[in-house]
Image: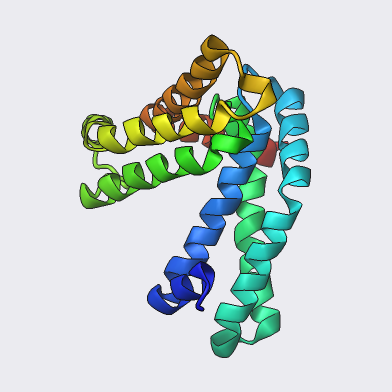
């Protein structure tokens, strides 16, 4: 019987498959970094903790890249390319946390949040909004994409409720529902504020470069 992973490799292009693995890694970082008002040191510490927790996910992405890209580039260059891409993500991640890009997601419901976020990104791609002509264009696309994915959000939240109700940490209904609502609301907030977040990241990088 063919595994789901093998089937995904068969149906998707190497680029799509590898991009999905990269998204898995960045999602892992989001889950373990948490949210809050981080100063530079706290953001650095949270990013370091997330990187440690997501080490296995990172290794899996590197290995996948080598398997998919070696026929074209050779194993050494394939590893170099993916390591460079991962390093770029890891380099800006502390600045993103400092800019308010953190999201508090209980690990058990990360797949549900990811499914909703995938719907959102698909909708944004359809609207060609990831490289916006203006802030207003981007924000309009965000609101339209959130509205289009409302059924997916509701379904994902219901599934999250079922999953967390079986955990000892979230047996209290109010606590469980608050955690789920926070995870999805903060995810929406991150998308609404993405341009501002990336502007803060850009300024932070310029400051670091000048120092």
Task: Say if residue 206 shows up in the picture.
Answer: no
Pick the front one: 194 or 65 = 65
* Residue beneath the point at 62% across and 20% down: 170
* Residue beneath the point at 41% across and 75% down: 13
What's the colour scheme? rainbow
35 vs 211: above or below: above
User: Where does the image place residue 2, in percent across and percent down from the top left?
Assistant: 50, 77
Pick the front one: 109 or 89 = 109
User: Where does the image place residue 120, in percent across and percent down from the top left?
Assistant: 33, 42
Q: State how many labels appear.
A: 0
* Residue beneath the point at 78% across and 31% down: 45
User: Where does the image place residue 147, in percent across and percent down from the top left?
Assistant: 23, 31
User: 6 left or right of 130?
Assistant: right
95 vs 131: above or below: above
* Residue beneath the point at 56% across and 44% down: 27
Residue 39 occupies which quadrant of the picture?
top right
User: Where does the image place residue 109, in percent across and percent down from the top left?
Assistant: 54, 36
Pick the front one: 163 or 123 = 163
Q: Looking at the figure, which quarter contains the C terminus? A: top right
Residue 84 occupies which quadrant of the picture?
bottom right
108 vs 10: above or below: above
Residue at the extreme top = 174
Residue 166 occupies which quadrant of the picture?
top right
Task: Say if residue 67 shows up in the picture.
Answer: yes
């Amino acid at each position: 019987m063919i595994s789901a992973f093998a089937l995904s490799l068969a149906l998707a292009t190497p680029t799509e498959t590898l991009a999905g693995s990269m998204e898995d890694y960045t999602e892992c970082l989001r889950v373990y970094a948490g949210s809050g008002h981080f100063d530079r040191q706290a953001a650095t510490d949270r990013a370091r903790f997330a990187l440690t927790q997501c080490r296995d996910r990172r290794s899996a992405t590197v290995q996948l890249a080598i398997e998919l890209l070696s026929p074209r580039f050779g194993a050494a260059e394939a590893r170099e390319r993916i390591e460079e891409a991962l390093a770029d993500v890891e380099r800006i991640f502390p600045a993103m946390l400092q800019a308010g890009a953190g999201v508090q997601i209980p690990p058990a419901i990360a797949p549900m949040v990811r499914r909703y976020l995938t719907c959102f990104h698909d909708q944004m791609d359809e609207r060609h909004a990831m490289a916006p002509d203006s802030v207003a264009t981007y924000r309009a696309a965000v609101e339209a994409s959130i509205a289009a994915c409302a059924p997916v959000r509701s379904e994902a939240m219901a599934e999250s409720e079922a999953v967390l109700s079986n955990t000892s940490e979230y047996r209290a209904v109010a606590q469980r529902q608050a955690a789920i609502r926070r995870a999805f609301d903060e995810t929406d907030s991150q998308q609404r504020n993405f341009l501002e977040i990336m502007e803060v990241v850009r300024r932070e990088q310029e400051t670091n470069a000048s120092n």
